[in-house]
Image: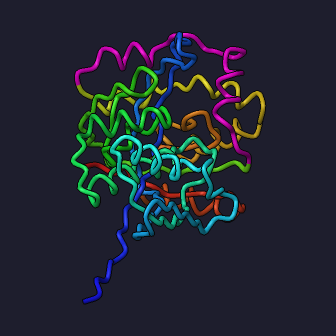
Amino acid sequence: MEIIVLDIVEYAYAKLNLGLKILGRRSDGFHDILSVFQTVDLCDRLVFRHAGQGQIILSCDDADLPVGPENLVYQAISAFRSYTGMDRGVEVAIEKRIPMAAGLGGGSSDAAAVLRVLNRVWEAGLSSRELREIGAALGSDVPFFVRQKGTAIVSGRGEHLRYVPWSADVAYVLVCPGFQVHTGWAFANYKKTLTGHGEYDSFINSLKDLPVSDFWGHIENDFLPLIIQSHPETRDILSRLTDAGAIAASMSGSGSTLYGVFESRDVAEAVWARFEAEQFRTFLCCPVGE
């Protein structure tokens, strides 16, 4: 009797950095950071199918995304097989919605989705800790995405995670200003405009949970001065978000995505529509909790 294997679908959510401080360079070449990561309901959709023994077959609906060994999904499959000793084949079709090189963690989220699915479908029985260990070798953001959804205070190079409850009913307007920022370049140049320690890290380090009502006024991103210096239009977009009623406006990760935080969904929709009408790549998002 023929066995029909149905497609396995997994969603890989984007994240916002609600603040980001760079605390210093480590001896291993990475940087210690302090940030609040939060998943939002902008996501890639990954479709998994069985393939012949040992095969890795990738496809993507965005022609700009390479589908060979340089792709994090490909690397995650290879890393999982190496860790477990399994050599099964898998085909992954990536439906790409999260902008690339935009500070939203799309590639890292896709990689973590691979680890979750292979662990489940191949019945490898790895713990979350082991999946995070595999993920950390792929990229600093991957361990956060292993849990798929939630809000966490992130430190170290991204491997130290403290998940916190989130109660704020907010909407985010994400604006992609039309240029990409590669993380390696941002880390190589941020010192020229480093803001130093400020209220954000003092506030976050003192927390046992996250009092959202006190949080928005403390957001800082150490990459933002660099991006404003390199792309002055960034400042104008942030001002427009604030003038339109955002209670906070900042940048996610090393950029380039900018976001405004709105307490009113109706106001957020109106702001989103204005940027959309001006041909910005814009998203209206909400937090995604567990």
Residue in front for this viewpoint, 8 or 57:
57
Q: Main secondary structure of the magenta part?
A: helix
> How was this image coloured?
rainbow
Q: Residue furthest bottom?
A: 1
The picture places residue 94, in percent across and down from the top left corner, at: 52, 64
Residue 206 located within the stretch drawn in magenta: yes
The picture places residue 100, in percent across and down from the top left corner, at: 62, 50
The picture places residue 126, in percent across and down from the top left corner, at: 25, 43
| Residue 122 higher or lower than 232, as above or below | below
Which residue is depicted at the point 48% across and 21% down? 33
Residue in front for this viewpoint, 25 or 288:
25
User: What are the residue bounds of the magenta stretch?
Assistant: 179-208
Which quadrant would residue 216 be assigned to in this image? top left
| Residue 28 higher or lower than 52, as above or below | above
Instruction: Evaluate whether residue 264 shows in this view.
Output: no
Is residue 275 rendered to the left or right of residue 57? right
Which residue is depicted at the point 44% across and 69% down? 51
Q: Which quarter shows the N terminus?
A: bottom left
Residue 175 located within the stretch drawn in magenta: no
Residue in front for this viewpoint, 177 or 28:
28
Which residue is depicted at the point 32% across and 78% down? 5
The picture places residue 93, in percent across and down from the top left corner, at: 51, 67
Is residue 8 rendered to the left or right of residue 64? left
